[in-house]
Image (cartoon, rainbow, N blue to C red):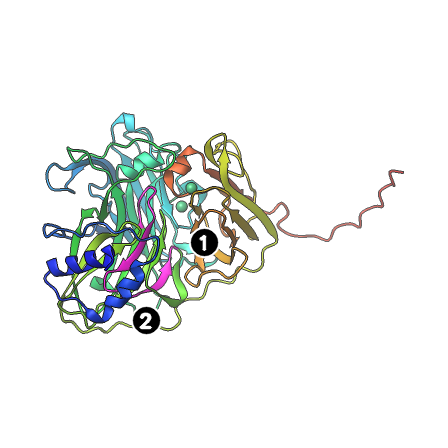
Amino acid sequence: MTKALLAFILASALAGIGIHLGRAPTSMARSQNAIRVAVPAATSGSFTHPLVFPPVDTNANISVNIDEGCVQIMDGPCTNMWTYGGTYPGLTVRRPTGQPTNVTFTNNLDAKAGEMTVHNHGNHSTADSDGQPTSLLIATGGSRTYRYDGLEAGGNQRGKTQFYHDHRMDVTGRNVWMGLTGLYIVDDPADPPTLPSGNFDLPLIIADRQFDAKNQIPYVFNPNGVTGDKFLVNGVYQPYLEVGDRKYRFRILDASNFRTYFLELSNGDSFIQIGTESGLLPAPVTRTGMRMGPAERLDVVVNFAGELGQNIYLVDALTGTQLLEFRVTQHVTDDSSIPATLRPPPDIGEPTVTRNWSFNQAGGHWAINGLRFDPNRVDARPVLGTTEKWVFTNPTGQPHTVHIHDVSQQCVSRNGGACYPYETMKETWYLMPGETLEVKLKFTDHTGMYMLHCHMVEHEDDGMMTQFEVVARADPTPRPRPTPRQRPMAH
Ligand code: C2O
Ligand code: CU
Ligand code: CU
């Protein structure tokens, strides 16, 4: 018997439930995968705290204080964090698409935290409201209003699960680690109304932290990533969630600075992935395991039907850690359904320009195309209204999560072949060592400066970031050109 299976059985026994014999072979087979690392099962003292959810604000005008606060996470002393609105994760902004939203952030942190800047990750923002890393900052004691119009390419923005976080140059890692992360959900009436909704549509924000003996989380920069050994869901360590025996929609975010997870359900059940960072997929995709890197979102449905009385764990298979315990405690009727087709990606035409981006190194630092971030350098000037193909390569020995601001990207190919069916349209892409990814993107609505970077934030802070500037057409109304005169021959 493998250690992983033993751990699974021990955990099940401790939780006071029977082993689901029909599924044991699946567990055994899956545990033989080389990437799995077995760790001791949770003891009976674990999973005693209920999962909680950040407060939600649905108003058009929202004020968020960036405050220091002591957040109760581990048993014992509370943890000093930097928060959006007093909680970790911060306030969830939830808005209907197509509606303007103004969010005013006030920086109440101690002066030594410095200036802040807030990026609404995944939002199609104007450059001024995109959270620039070195300009339009929020000074200590100051405020700044970010305006989001909810529009894109002549219509409403697609429904999706975005998140906002600090983006200050050089210290994004520290600021995010200290707590500056919150969800920003866009609801879209054009999405199928039969998907699980209301109390059955829940966010799961996964992040790791390293706590010291006093439950504090001092941040020590390491260009190769800052990780912790405690995995939190919505800011709770080893939480449980009581659910009914029906379908739930979970909007999962990897809010960690650096850590990659491989999510599975302990009973071998599948997730039905319905969406990505960029909204719903064209069609649902059934997956038993899902890799997830920093800033990626997985919009999934889990069906607990037929599992009344069971405890099921959301597991990170890379470390063998149970993240969350689902307790199927109630029988409820399920009026939700997942349509066979969800939403096709928009037609953005064929690319007319190709650019290559190598996520590599320079002088011992992380870089893009051999150059570290320089706010005075612009590495691409795509023209508003055009579609380009961007080719990403990873010649390093480490994975990277490629993230592009402004507009979503559509997958063209992965490693010269087909894209994964769950990666039709995204804005954060996992790139393993040696991989090549081709995407296409259309620069709509806004001109100005946008970022492109690795979202393993210590890589970003170390220099794996650059910027592109969307420029207006040089000649917006093409006129007939005079026939060029014959140039005199040189010889
Ligand atoms: Cu979520 Cu440029 O970042
Ligand atoms: Cu972003
Ligand atoms: Cu990276």
Is 259 contained in the magenta span?
Answer: yes
Distance CA(mark 1)–CA(mark 2): 24 Å
Q: Which residues are magenta?
A: 254-277
**Residue with the mark numbered 1:** 408
State the residue in front, 174 or 48.
48
State the residue in front, 65 or 228.
228
Do the numbered discs 1 and 2 sit on residues whose CB atoms are within 8 Å?
no
Is 454 contained in the magenta span?
Answer: no
**How far across and how far down the image is residue 213, in percent?**
16, 33
Camera-side mark, 1 or 2: 2
**Residue with the mark numbered 2:** 338
Q: What quarter of the picture does the N terminus occupy?
A: bottom left
Q: Is residue 455 above or below residue 315?
A: above
Q: What quarter of the picture does the C terminus occupy?
A: top right
| Amino acid type, callout 2 | Ile
Say whether residue 148 is visible.
yes
Q: Is residue 374 left or right of residue 331?
A: right
Q: Is residue 451 left or right of residue 239?
A: right
Q: Is residue 132 above or below residue 242?
A: above
Q: Residue at x 50, y 29 (%)?
A: 363
Q: Secondary structure at mark 2?
A: loop
